[in-house]
Image (spheres, rainbow, N blue to C red):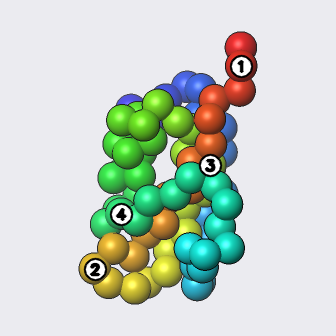
Amino acid sequence: MMDERQPDIKRSKGKFDPVTETRDWSAAASEERCRKLAKAKGKRLVEIIDTEDEPLPIICIFEDYPDE
């Protein structure tokens, strides 16, 4: 079930540099886990990066929800 507040999520592949990334992020095993992490953090999932690096190949990028 998708969160209706969730806009399109940007998806990309490639390297990820945790030093230069200024947004809130977490590593995960799957895109589904990214969605669960976003819900637990109370944040919006805005980007998923598939680094193809094991054991946690997915990088989840989060932002705060805009004030409503």
Q: Measure the alpha-carbon separation of dots 3 and 4.
A: 15 Å
Check the image and name the residue furthest to the top. 68
Q: Are marks 1 and 2 in contact (CB under 8 Å)?
A: no
Check the image and name the residue furthest to the right. 67
Mark 1 / mark 2, whichever is N-terminal? 2
- Residue at image position (38%, 45%) is 37
Local packing at callout 4 (Cα closer than 10 Å; few below 14, some 14-19, many 20+) is: many
Residue type, label 2? Pro
The residue that disc 4 covers is 28
* Nearest-to-viewer mark from 3 and 1: 1
Q: Measure the alpha-carbon separation of dots 4 and 1.
A: 27 Å
Q: Measure the alpha-carbon separation of dots 1 and 2.
A: 36 Å
Left or right, 16 with respect to 51, comes to right
Q: Measure the alpha-carbon separation of dots 4 and 2.
A: 9 Å
Label at residue 67: 1
Decide if residue 15 is in sight here: yes
Q: Secondary structure at mark 3?
A: strand
Q: Secondary structure at mark 2?
A: loop
- Residue at image position (47%, 31%) is 42
Residue 68 lies in quadrant: top right
Estimate the x, y position of residue 40 in percent, counting from the top left: 36, 35
Mark 4 / mark 1, whichever is N-terminal? 4
Q: Are marks 2 and 3 in contact (CB under 8 Å)?
A: no
Q: Measure the alpha-carbon separation of dots 3 and 1.
A: 16 Å
- Residue at image position (40%, 85%) is 53
Residue 10 lies in quadrant: bottom right
Q: Secondary structure at mark 1?
A: loop
The residue that disc 2 covers is 55
